[in-house]
Image (cartoon, rainbow, N blue to C red):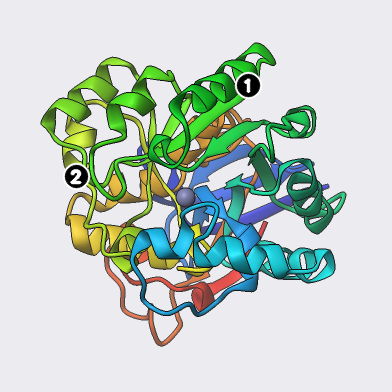
Amino acid sequence: MEQTLKGTIIYGDEFEPVDGYITIEDGIIKTVEECTGKTDTIIAPCFVNAHTHIGDSVIKDPPFLPLAELVQPPHGLKHRILKETSHDDLVRSMKASIADMIHTGTCAFSDFREGGLGGVRALKSALGSDSGIEARILGRPVNGDMSYLDSCEGTGLSSTNDMDIDIVKGIARKTKEKGKKFAIHAGERDSSDISAALELLPDFLIHLTNAGKKDIKAVAEANIPVVVCLRSNFMTGSGLPPVKKMLDGGILVAAGTDNVMLNSVNMFSEMEFLAKTCRFEDRQVFKLCTLNGAKLLGIDRESGSIKTGKKARLMILTKNSNNMQGIKNPLSSLVRRARPDDIIGIV
Ligand SMILES: [Zn+2]
């Protein structure tokens, strides 16, 4: 089936706004051609949300508490509530977050799923057989049981400070022996767990909120990508990560919305927050929310930008809404102003 779309295309890996047509055949971008004349829409690649915990979708409005009291295993608020949540409620709430991601323009996400094999299965059941979104699930052991590894992409742990380091090392080793991905949070509350996390040679790190100069240099030298979650850090009072310094140091940085308990999965909100707190180039901000996430997840050959041969994972936004009418710079308006209700179509 062939489909043609006309609009201002946020084109290529450099996200250059180009007025033109996109032809899509069987879900693949076949051609991108320039045109002249006014266009009423912006056609942009969909977001990649590089770090979520959608398991805590059952908790939407916790009080402002210190980070440890909120999320630290095993006694943080999140873990106490998850323990009491029925399987059906858990799956239902995750389904809603998945639908929310799709409606707000996200085509892929990477989730840290608690609860061992049962936790991974619950998320898979929420995804169903054809959810319209790509999920990369990183599970977590329960009482040493790592059988979840056969059902997902790898392991995602909290911090080296939350567990016996020898146990953490064993989990990392077993994950890698299976040829799976290993990722871990680091530098969120302070920088004390960054070196220990680096020694585990993770496939990627989450946060690095409190990373200093030396930490950034070490992460860059080890060539380890980082997912930053700014709204989450702000909400937990952890500070804001040195995103610009990480990028200048040559680190691949992607963006994620983190716990659903703390933030909605809406990447427009994350992107706007990132743009306005970091104040660097809009193009770079958009890249963090799309192509860099795709690279980190290993799906950049088919997702993350608009190019011929890639999958058509696109969102179409109107330029005529009350919010968007009169815009002059489509990329800046997309990054700092656009909202999910400006979306008129998802391909
Ligand atoms: Zn997290």
> Quick check: 229 left or right of 306?
left
Furthest residue to the right?
Answer: 129
Circles 2 and 1: CB distance less than 8 Å? no
**Image location of residue 256, percent across then percent down:** 45, 51
Furthest residue to the bottom?
Answer: 322
- Comparing 287 with 223, the one in front is 223
Check the picture and name the quadrant holding the C terminus: bottom right
Residue located beneath label 2 in the image: 242
Location of residue 163 with respect to 325 vertically, above or below? above
Query: Is tag 2's residue or tag 1's residue first in the polypeptide sequence?
Result: 1
Q: Which mark is residue 215?
A: none
Furthest residue to the left?
Answer: 213
Q: Is residue 162 visible?
A: yes
Residue drawn 39% across the image and 29% down it: 225
> Quick check: 310 left or right of 165?
right
Question: Secondary structure under badge 1?
Answer: helix
- Comparing 232 with 163, the one in front is 163
Location of residue 293 with respect to 106 vertically, above or below? above
Residue drawn 35% across the image and 23% down it: 198
In front: label 2 or label 1: 1
Label 2 crowding class (10 Å Cα cut-off): few <14, some 14-19, many 20+?
A: some
**Image location of residue 294, percent across then percent down:** 52, 37
Location of residue 330 with respect to 107 vertically, above or below? below
Label 1 crowding class (10 Å Cα cut-off): few <14, some 14-19, many 20+?
A: many
- Comparing 146 with 11, the one in front is 146
Residue 5 sits in quarter = bottom right
**Image location of residue 180, percent across then percent down:** 64, 22
Residue located beneath label 1 in the image: 175
Q: Amino acid at mark 1?
A: Thr
